[in-house]
Amino acid sequence: MNVRSAVKVGAVALASTFVLAACGSKNSSSSKESVNFEESAEIATMDQSKVTDVVGFTQLGNTQEGLYRLGAKSKVKNALATSTKESKDGKTWTFTLRKNAKWSNGDAVTAKDFVYAWQRTVNPKTASEYAYLFSGIKNADKIAAGKANYKTLGIKADGNYKLVVTLDRPIAYFKLLMGFPTFFPQDQKVVEKYGSKYGTASDKLVYNGPYKQTGWTGTNLSWKLVKNNNYWDKKNVKMDTIKYQVVKDASTGLNLYNSKKLDVANITGNQVAQYKNNKDYILRKQSSMFYLQYNMKKQKVFRNAKIRKAISLAINRKQLTGKVLADGSGNPKGLVSTGLASNPKTGEDFASEAEVKSAVTQNLTEAKKLMAEGLKEEGKSSLSFTLLGDDTASTKQITEFLQSQIEKIPNVKVSLQNVPFKTRLTNSSDGKFDVVLSAWGADFSDPISFLQLFVTGNAQNNGGFSNKQYDKLIKASNTTDATNPQKRWDDMVQAEKILMNEQGVAPVFQQAQSQLWSSKLKGVVYNTAGVNFDYKSLYLTK
Amino acid sequence: MEEKMKLAPDAFEPVSKKDELDDEKIVAPSRTFIQDAWRRLRQNKASYVCLWILVVIGLIAFTSPITASHPNTSNPNYANLPPKIPGVNINGFNGTSVVAGKRVDAYKQNHVPSKVHYTLGTDYLGRSLAQRILRGTLVSLLIGLFATLIDLIVGVGYGVISAWKGGITDIILQRIIEVISSVPNIVIMVLLMLILKGGMLPIILAIAFNGWTTMARLTRAQTLQLKSQEYVLAARTLGESTFKIAVKHLLPNLSSVIIIQTMFTIPSAIFFEAFLSYIGIGIQAPTASLGTLISDGQKNFQFLPYQMWYPAIMLSIIMIAFNILADGLRDAFDPRTARR
Amino acid sequence: MARYLVRRIFYLALTLFLIASITFFLMKLMPGTPLNNQAKLTPQQIKVIYEHYGLNKPVWQQYVSYIVDAAHGNFGLSFQFSDQPVSYLISSRIGPSLQLGGQAMIVGVVVGIIVGSLSAIRKNTWVDGTSTFISILGISIPSFVLAILLQYYLGLKLQLFPIADWGGFSYTVLPTLALAASPFAETSRFVRTEMVDVLGSDYIELARAKGLSRIGIVWHHALRNSLIPLVTVIGPLTAAIMTGSMVVENIFSVPGIGEQFVKSILVNDYPTIMGVTMLYSALLCAMLLLTDLVYGIIDPRIRIAGKEG
């Protein structure tokens, strides 16, 4: 998903984060367990087909359930599926569903609910932004292009408790997708009952996950997740209530935490310096990468690899993450975020294996040299361009920093343009930029989530980077090598190296979330990609 | 009493024939009026002090391109250093700050050479806060002054025309004012900022956009009064052009109203700029204004209080000085209040 | 009076119509769309979304239907919350804003009257100096600074009131104080000026000559007469509170309109921006109208002017 950067500074953040409180009252006479969390932005929608932001995905991930739940390190665990059968060619998947799963309105969760949900999402009339994730499932691409009816999608219910999915090509990360809310079932009866109002308030949808949501009116700043008594595995849900409060101002969140109104707070820049050694401090890596894209379509100079390399070499990323952001954000090793996936054989992290040191370290002398050479080749004496970025406080800081760094190369002038998140995205897709600071967060824990972006012609490839070898490798990883994990892995490592050596994009930093997390609160499952937080087994220690 | 005092001995001497007899020429009254006001203003100690404070701040701000020539030079290794004045060992001025409950020497921690010190500390990019405040004051003052200038030109012109023409013109112009002033000013500013974006000019325009209506109303009311005065009537009868009457007779008599209103407009423009910065649609980085500095500092208030306090104090001093001065001027220009 | 009222309401409607038209076309100049990320959508999907929001029609048709809908209090669908009508968004959030605004207005005006009168009665003493200074301070500190100072010292350090959130009355105390600063300052300055004027007038001299007590004079004559003009500043005070609420609601996590407006600006949610703009304008227009009516009733001198228009 596209990522905005305000996460820490409060204004409009996407990232989900919380604060939980021992919930005041000491009269915990009953065994009711309750915590208070904080979100940094409102819920935009609870409709699985329409949700696009992390707040929404976190809510859905904890109130709904699909075939699998993802454990720590994105380990796939059966949820609604009790058994899975994959055909030899990897193109047919048969799932057997559990029979005791129910919606919160008492309806049984059946294979038909999956079929309905998937068809609804790929139906162009629904206009789901996440329909693209279905690419690879039979006929999904044709449906998206309007060449086939949405009912021809490769998913079928064989009776109430058997689900058969057919694919156009093997998808190596297919199981991970099944743990993502976009692929969860929906109760047709309820969706049709509420029509366009479906998912616009807590009481306008039904739940089949560990929690039910209550109190969200569609626009308000606080709501609750309460234990779902219709959940098939309710005996393993310890928490009775999770209270949510939207807090947009970072210092307000910290104040609430310090006054014990909240036990978890998101902290930012300078607050991190203060609490780094606190016992409650937790650094949560995220799979969100910030990188520069050069508009090679519009600006001829950026087609020159030397100029791109020079700009990247001018940036002292260590200084950015250590001194300017100072919030736990990490230096990038490449485009693919650190901690996302590990080598199927050796267990080595993808980012380390594919690291190209020269692509992410500062070398000002080299930068000056390359820039001079590059400009000479282009027949120019100077370079001036506009750097486009979000208008949140933290992005403003980052772009200001980048400006001062890049301008250390003689004859280079950078001007800044900070615009709202959506405008940045629109300008990026329309090619209205010279250089843009973009951000991407992986939807599932596989390097391809990043790497497929820069294939020639990909809609997210705003700069127009194109490299035949790169395209070939990515294609191989998706087709011929898809069923061979090791070979697929090597393809991706090579592709990343090409991208970095060519500096098709320049990674700037990997976002992280620093939190103060009450030591009483245990059992949370955190993943850097997809649904970040799973509270199913959350509990309080005394 | 005072009327008598003004009679100078030369008033009794015959007018020399060489002098042109020009009844309309108003030379003395407006000057004496200003002088009179000036005298009364000086008696109002608070206002007088504020006037000088503003003069000093103005001087500091307008010389800041020379004195603070590098407000945007960043040095991230020196980020967020607290204020340090060599030789002063008082917490808050000795380069120490409290980190996680313990007071540490931030300069030592960041390996800052001993001869480097920042009197007011540094910001998140290691830029000198002192330099940025000086330049920010300049930017804020410029925004205030130019927004007020637009107010002045548009508002006074509009008010005078409206009152002078009267009739249907007046009615239409007044309706327009009514429409504009019934939109909350903040909404207009936000809408304009969304469309214009960025630099100083859009902010000035956005702030001035409905600020001038008050000025227009005041001048209109005043002009309506003046219009019926005998000397204006006389000038008209003598065939003086409207423009000349406006410049020679109306403006000098409007001056007190205008000056007082100006003194109120400048600080409110500065204030609105700060507000726009806070909600994230103010001046573009890396340019600093007092507003951007305060809203940046506000985020770190608990741990780096100096980043908020210094620009906030600067802003407050300017605001207070302008307001007290405006009060003083109002009294000074209004003989009634001065007498009591 | 009735004719005057009809005329005023006509002008009010005209004003709102003009504002609606201007904001509509201003917003059309802006690049915003309801799409989050067009790169992820197919042209067909984009078409569906545009149809859903009525953006596929020619601009003049959009304009006509916008004006007609707006007259019925319907401002379309929000861009940021999917399928959430702006009118619902506004109605579900107006409560806290009205409560805070009302409380701040009352606190600000009442305290302002007290401080202003004290200042005028004890003119040129230390009482006057201090209160003048405090009221000037009230308009010299940005509300976002005042708000976090209150939150930090009264909320966190002294633990007197909740730091943020929205619940019972105690949650409203800090935001109310932060919001009340500006109306307080305006009122006290205004009252002081008026009261100084009144205290110097002949009928007060007369009352004094008759030997009425000081308190009696202030209470029966001065206060009443100096408060009448105060009605005229209610319009500007309303506007000031609207401005302040955007900041204060954000800092104290109050689910109000101001907070929503700021968010909408940051995410280019134009239907919401337009809706809130109309709401604010209507509110201010109504306040101004009310002001004039009330003023006409309580001050007999105005009635004549009222007839003129």
Image (cartoon, helix red, strand yellow):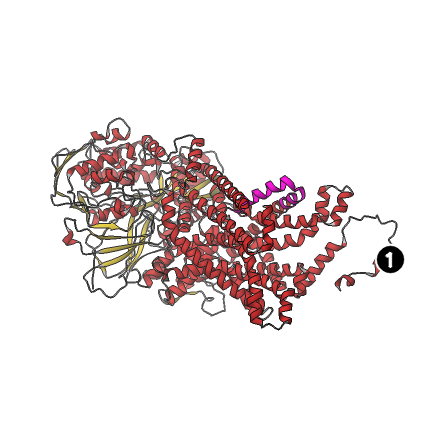
| Nearest to the observer: residue C169 or residue B39 | C169
Q: Is residue C200 visible?
A: no
Residue A310 x %, y % = 41, 42
Give above or below for C61 relative to B236: above
Residue type, label 1: Glu
| The C terminus of chain A, quarter of image | bottom left
Q: Chain of mark 1?
A: B
Residue with the most extreme front position: C2
- Looking at the rendering, the stretch of residues picked out in magenta corresponds to B158-182
Residue A515 x %, y % = 30, 56
Magenta segment includes C231 = no
Q: Is residue B49 visible?
A: yes
Magenta segment includes B179 = yes
Residue lying at 27% horizontally and 44% vertically, measured from the top left: A46
Residue C104 x %, y % = 45, 58
| Nearest to the observer: residue A313 or residue C157 | C157
Q: Give the quarter of the image for residue C83.
A: top left
Give above or below for B164 relative to C175: above
Say whether residue A204 is left or right of residue B76: left
| Nearest to the observer: residue C248 or residue A366 | C248
Name the residue tied to disc 1: B13
SS at circle 1: loop
Residue A29 x %, y % = 20, 65
| The N terminus of chain A, quarter of image | top left
* Magenta stretch: dominant secondary structure: helix
- Counting labels gives 1
Badge 1: few (under 14), some or many (20 or more) residues near its Cα, within 10 Å?
Answer: few
